[in-house]
Structure formats: structure tokens, C-alpha cells
């Protein structure tokens, strides 16, 4: 899909909102800082938008480029094995930074593909504190040495962790049992127990020899924005 096609998909999205009476051309122009005629010409295919202009429209309408892409095309370009016809689903092993930031994982960022029973994955309950419907739900990461030792004996360095990215709530999955989470930190993610204290998230290790750390929740963000997902399965090599 080229830039011209992306602009056409943006037009279609905006027209759908206008026809649903969720938006007007004047409102869009005011929010994005354009003259009304500029937006009208764009909507009526009389002109295009610059990259900067398109970015302004996406921002004010809370859209991303991923919202404009055809899901089938994403999957086709990713060349990730499609779901099998048996009782197993493919789950992608990725780096922590990819798990933390990428709603949809593309081929170049996949380290491996592992199979999990479809019945097991379907039994897992989601719990979203902030919307994640467009996010690929399950990914795998490997615990690094720091996380593995700080969460010992629940984890070991190199442990395979199944992350449910549709569970970014602090609600306990099981009564009287702490959830273990992958959390965004320093451009990647770390694995810890998580508590909220005012405008801070407190990250606690299992191993008391390691320090507690604190993440301040930025203004305009919610705590769920920092939680990559709940650790719902741990695999250890022996």
C-alpha cells in the first residue's frame, strides 16, 4: 500500500465518521489547524495532504497508520504461518521491546513460532484497563538474566513467558494470588509484580535481594498504558 492509498483510506475513515454524525469538516479543520477549504478539498479528492498534515489529522482523530491498513495485507506481508487446522495456534516469540510497543508483529521481528493448544488460549480471561482490541493478543518473550534472577524461583533466566496483552488491568486473575506482569520500562519490558500507589506503579521482585523500582505515570496516561500484559504461562528448560 503506497502513500496515495493510505490517504484514500483516511478519506474513507473520515467520511464514515462524518456520515455517522461523529464529526464535521469544520470540526476537523479546527482541531487539526487547517482552513476549512483545505480539509474540504482533501475530503473531495481535489488535493492531498502532506506527511505532516496527515500526521496532524491522525493525531486529532486518535488514529494510527495501522488503522488504515488492510488486516489481510498486513498478514500477507508478514508471512507469518497462518493458524493451523489442528488444535494448536501459533504464538510468536519476540523481543521485549516488540512486545511492549508493536500492536501487530511483522515477520522481521519474529524470533520463533511456538504452538499452544487453542483450547488453553481460549480459556484465558482478558481484562483490559485501557483498550487493546487491535493488539495481537498473545506473544512470547524470554526472561533475561536480570528478570529471571529477580523473580526466582518463579522464573529463571531464559524462561519462556506467554504474555496476554489483553490483560493490562491490576485486577487479580485468581483470588489471593498476585499477577506477574510484563511492564514497559527503559524502551523494553521487565517482569515483576505490580502495585499502584497514587500516580506511580511499584514494581516488586520475588527475590528480596533485588530492589523495588517505581515508574511515575505521566500526565495524560493511565496505568494500563504501561502494562504490556499478564504472564499467563511460564516454560523453563531443564
Image: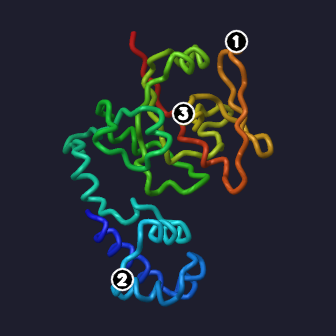
The residue at the point 39 percent across, 73 percent down is 10
User: Label 1: few (<14), some or many (≥20) within 10 Å?
Assistant: few
Q: Earlier in the sequence, mark 2 or mark 1?
A: 2
From the viewer's perspective, tell me whether residue 35 is left or right of residue 88.
Answer: right
Q: Which residue is mark 3?
A: 189
Q: From this viewpoint, which residue is outermost toward the right?
A: 198
**Residue count near mark 2 (Cα–Cα under 10 Å), binned few <14, some 14–19, many ≥20:** few
Can you tell which mark lies on residue 177? none
- Above or below, 181 relative to 64: above
In which quarter of the view is residue 29 placed?
A: bottom right
Does dot 1 land on a helix, a strand or a loop? loop
Residue 12 position, x and y percent, is: 36, 78
The residue labelled by disc 2 is 47
Residue 75, x across and y down, in percent: 26, 52
Q: Which of 117 and 104 lies nearest the eye of the viewer?
A: 104
Task: Confirm whether residue 12 shows in the render.
Answer: no
Mark 2 vs mark 1: in front: 2
Q: CA distance from mark 2 to mark 3?
A: 42 Å
Mark 2 vs mark 1, CA separation in Å: 62 Å
Sequence-earlier tag: 3 or 1: 3
Determine which residue is flagged by label 1: 209
Amino acid at each position: 500500500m503506497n502513500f496515495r492509498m493510505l490517504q484514500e483510506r483516511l478519506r474513507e475513515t473520515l467520511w464514515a465518521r462524518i456520515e455517522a454524525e461523529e464529526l464535521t469538516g469544520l470540526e476537523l479543520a479546527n482541531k487539526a489547524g487547517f482552513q476549512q477549504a483545505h480539509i474540504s478539498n482533501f475530503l473531495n479528492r481535489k488535493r492531498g495532504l502532506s506527511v505532516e498534515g496527515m500526521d496532524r489529522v491522525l493525531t486529532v482523530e486518535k488514529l494510527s497508520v495501522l488503522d488504515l491498513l488492510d488486516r489481510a495485507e498486513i498478514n500477507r506481508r508478514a508471512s507469518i504461518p497462518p493458524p493451523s487446522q489442528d488444535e494448536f495456534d501459533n504464538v510468536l516469540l519476540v523481543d521485549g521491546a516488540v512486545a511492549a510497543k508493536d500492536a501487530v508483529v511483522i515477520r522481521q521481528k519474529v524470533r520463533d513460532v511456538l504452538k499452544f493448544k487453542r483450547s488453553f488460549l481460549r480459556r484465558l480471561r482478558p481484562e483490559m484497563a485501557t483498550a487493546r482490541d487491535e493488539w495481537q493478543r498473545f506473544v512470547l518473550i524470554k526472561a533475561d538474566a536480570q528478570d529471571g534472577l529477580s523473580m526466582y524461583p518463579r522464573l529463571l533466566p531464559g524462561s519462556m513467558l506467554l504474555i496476554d496483552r489483553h490483560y493490562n488491568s491490576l485486577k487479580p486473575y485468581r483470588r489471593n494470588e498476585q499477577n506477574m506482569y510484563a511492564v514497559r520500562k527503559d524502551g523494553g519490558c521487565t517482569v515483576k509484580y505490580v502495585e499502584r500507589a497514587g500516580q506511580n506503579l511499584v514494581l516488586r521482585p520475588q527475590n528480596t535481594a533485588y530492589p523495588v523500582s517505581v515508574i511515575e505515570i505521566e500526565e495524560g496516561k493511565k496505568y494500563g498504558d504501561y502494562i504490556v500484559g499478564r504472564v499467563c504461562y511460564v516454560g523453563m528448560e531443564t
